[in-house]
Image: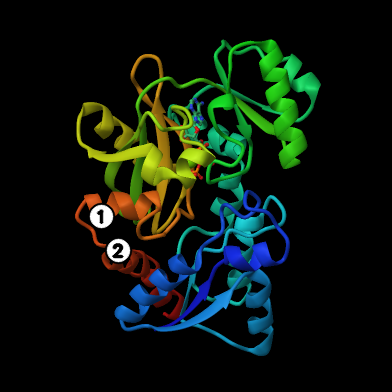
């Protein structure tokens, strides 16, 4: 197939003057080369496109592809992860991973939790805070957890995200709103085991490829899987593929959430156990990181016996069904 490849290269944004944290979600040259290498190895003819603006320019030039492998997270606006899918929809070009609706919804953790909770998926009680008055009105039991409502890669998240009283809560919300220019989401604190579940497929054929338990070493920034622990995962956290009653319950919750949200092809669902030891949904990552050595999904897949090239093949195969359908 002629496969276009859309992504946000971190170095491009650093060169343009954005800082390390602002670009934390974007991809390294190594990730781009690894995906491209796997696609070429599968026999595809790959064209590197780049970000949404580069895609727009190529589309206007008249370029077309059988499939676009899309990992672009976008830089601007709450719909940023939906922008490449939306452009490709406009030109009827199939692409990997979830559609515009899922990408726009799931970037907002509060709205996503409303949807999954309405379908009976367990998730921590929460409130979205846009103003100090919203924080003032919160009536949830401490400890609470405060994070940006629409970020990823642990941005704005670390040991300080747990708050034990009103003053800390107010300060945490104020800081998130000022720094990230968006609302904060406040949730009841989940003290238990942490899992990320790897998902492939869609709808009735969606399945888990395993549950990875995240453990925290003495060197960890805290027992929260936030920005510092993620960026320095090699020295601060451990990843163990687990298979026990609790991890299987986590996989069941993840599959249900994946299906409720209509996610496609591959991704990750993050969960943590509540005080009673029950795994509950934290968030979904429909564009999970794909660095072969550093990102959770490839790490999980490797431990589950799925080499990197096979993982990329599974993603293309899942998306490929839509190529056939769109030509029929
Ligand atoms: N309610 C909570 N209680 C306890 N810990 C939490 C809670 N919400 C999030 N965390 C911790 O913070 C981490 C990051 O949260 P979350 O997954 O929402 O952020 P993210 O930046 O979107 O992550 P990703 O890198 O997966 O995109 C979780 O993996 C967990 O360790
Ligand atoms: Mg997460």
Answer whether labels 1 and 2 touch (C-beta < 8 Å): yes
Does residue 166 lie above or below 25 as drawn?
above
- Of 100 and 137, nearer the camera is 137
Quadrant into which the N terminus falls: bottom left
Q: Quadrant of residue 7?
A: bottom right
Whether the residue carrying mark 1 lies under 8 Å from ligand 1 is answered with no
Return the residue at label 1: 302
Identify the residue shown where x is 35% and y is 31%: 217
Question: Badge 1: how crowded within 10 Å, few (<14), some, or many (20+)?
Answer: some
- Residue 53 lies left or right of residue 2; in this view the side is right
Indicate the quadrant containing the C terminus: top left, top right, bottom left or bottom right.
Answer: bottom left
State left or right for residue 38 relative to residue 189: left
The label number, if any, that marks residue 308 in the structure image? 2
> Quick check: can you spot residue 302?
yes
Image x and y of residue 31, in percent: 44, 65
Q: CA distance from mark 1 to mark 2?
A: 7 Å
User: Residue shown at 28%/53% (left/top)?
Assistant: 301
State how many labels appear: 2
Local SS, label 2? helix
Work out whether residue 256 can be spotted: no
Quick check: 130 above or below 106?
Answer: above
The numbered mark, 1 or 2, whose residue comes first in the sequence reads 1
**Numbered mark located on residue 3 in the image:** none
Horizontally, residue 93 falls left or right of residue 220, namely: right
* Mark 1 element type: helix
User: Residue farthest to the bottom?
Assistant: 62
Question: Above or below — where is 213 with respect to 316?
Answer: above
Q: Position of residue 22 (x, y in %)?
A: 66, 51
Residue 65 lies, in percent from the top left, at 50, 83
């Amino acid at each position: 197939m002629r496969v276009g490849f859309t992504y946000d290269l971190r170095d491009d944004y650093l060169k343009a003057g954005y800082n390390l944290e602002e670009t934390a979600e974007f991809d390294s040259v190594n990730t781009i080369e690894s995906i491209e290498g796997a696609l070429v190895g599968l026999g595809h003819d790959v064209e590197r496109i780049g970000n949404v603006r580069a895609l727009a320019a190529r589309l206007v030039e008249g370029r077309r592809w059988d499939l676009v492998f899309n990992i672009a997270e976008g830089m601007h606006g709450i719909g940023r992860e939906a922008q490449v899918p939306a452009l490709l929809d406009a030109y009827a070009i199939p692409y990997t991973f979830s559609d515009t609706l899922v990408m726009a919804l799931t970037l907002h953790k509060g709205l996503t939790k409303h949807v999954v909770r309405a379908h009976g998926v367990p998730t921590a009680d929460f409130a979205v805070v846009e103003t100090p008055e919203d924080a003032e009105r919160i009536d949830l039991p401490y400890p609470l957890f405060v994070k940006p409502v629409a970020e990823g890669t642990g941005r704005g998240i670390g040991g300080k995200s747990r708050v034990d009283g009103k003053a800390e809560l107010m300060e945490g919300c104020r800081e998130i709103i000022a720094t990230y220019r968006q609302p904060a989401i406040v949730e009841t604190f989940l003290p238990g085991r942490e899992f990320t579940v790897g998902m492939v497929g869609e709808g009735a054929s969606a399945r888990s490829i395993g549950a990875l338990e995240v453990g925290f070493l003495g060197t960890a920034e805290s027992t929260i899987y936030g920005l510092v622990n993620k960026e320095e995962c090699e020295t601060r956290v451990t990843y163990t593929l687990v298979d026990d009653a609790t991890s299987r319950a986590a996989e069941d919750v993840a599959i249900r959430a994946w299906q409720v949200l209509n996610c496609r092809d591959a991704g990750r669902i993050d969960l943590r156990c509540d005080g009673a030891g029950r795994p509950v949904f934290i968030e979904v990552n429909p564009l999970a990181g794909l660095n072969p050595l550093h990102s959770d999904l490839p790490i999980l897949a490797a431990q589950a016996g799925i080499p990197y090239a096979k993982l990329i093949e599974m993603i293309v195969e899942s998306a490929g069904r839509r190529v056939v359908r769109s030509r029929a």
